[in-house]
Image: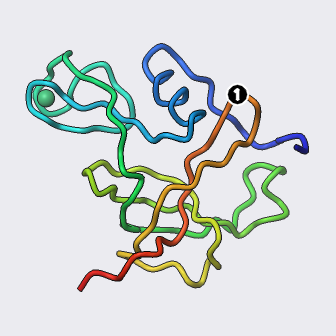
Amino acid sequence: MTQYTKPLPIPNDFDRPYWTALKKHELRMQKCLDCGEIWFPPNPVCPKCLSHNHQWIKLSGKGKVWSWVLFHQLYFPSFSEETPYNVIAVKLDEGPLMTSNMVECNNEDIYCDMLVEVFFDDVTELITLPKFRPAGRPKEV
Ligand SMILES: [Zn+2]
């Protein structure tokens, strides 16, 4: 593996289970044991009912493109070879909205409501980033 030069997350006590699961190629988020809300980003308190009772559940990794942008501005030199690059907002089937990048797809082929599935990008020995690629499932009407 070549050296990874882009910015990397630094897991903390609140989100470490999220990063640990990604390393195992699982997308896990917190589900409230009192009201059933599933939320992202990680937070010790349910954003809907303020309960502290939750468990980390495994998600399907499937969702739809909710929105996307192409970044033409170079903020980090390590992105120079792939600028413009996409940033997508994915509405997961289980409800949460998360930002990521689309892979295995040309930027001009991204569209709203495009069906996607998670792709686990092992960028370093410690960090796996969740990215998305077009899902091979029939388009919903
Ligand atoms: Zn709740």
Measured as percent of width and height from the top left, residue 14 is found at 43, 18
**Secondary structure type for disc 1:** loop
Q: Is residue 23 left or right of residue 31?
A: right
User: Which residue is drawn at the image coordinates 57% and 22% (left, top)?
Assistant: 11
Residue pictured at 66% horizontal, 48% vertical: 121
Q: Give amino acid for label 1.
A: Leu
Q: Write down the quadrant of residue 84 in the picture.
A: bottom right
Ligand 1 sits in quadrant: top left
- Label 1: few (<14), some or many (≥20) within 10 Å? few
The colour scheme is rainbow
Residue name at image x 34 percent, y 25 percent? 43
Front in this rendered view, residue 140 or 65: 140
Residue 111 % position (x, y): 45, 80
Asked if 42 appears above or below 128 in the picture, the reply is above
- Quarter residue 89 falls in: bottom left
Q: How many numbered marks does the figure carry?
A: 1
Is 141 rendered above or below residue 57?
below
In which quadrant of the rendered image does the N terminus lie?
top right
Q: Is residue 23 above or below residue 11?
A: below
Q: Nearer the viewer, residue 92 or 66?
A: 92
The residue beneath circle 1 is 126
Measuring from the top left, give residue 128's x and y in whole percent: 64, 39
Residue 74 found in image quarter: bottom right
**Residue at mark 1: C-beta within 8 A of ligand 1:** no
Return the x and y of residue 91 as percentages of the image width and height: 33, 59
Left or right of 124? Residue 49 is left
Q: Nearer the viewer, residue 54 or 25?
A: 25
Q: Residue furthest right?
A: 2
Q: Identify the image quadrant of the C terminus.
A: bottom left
Residue at 52% x, 78% y: name it. Answer: 110
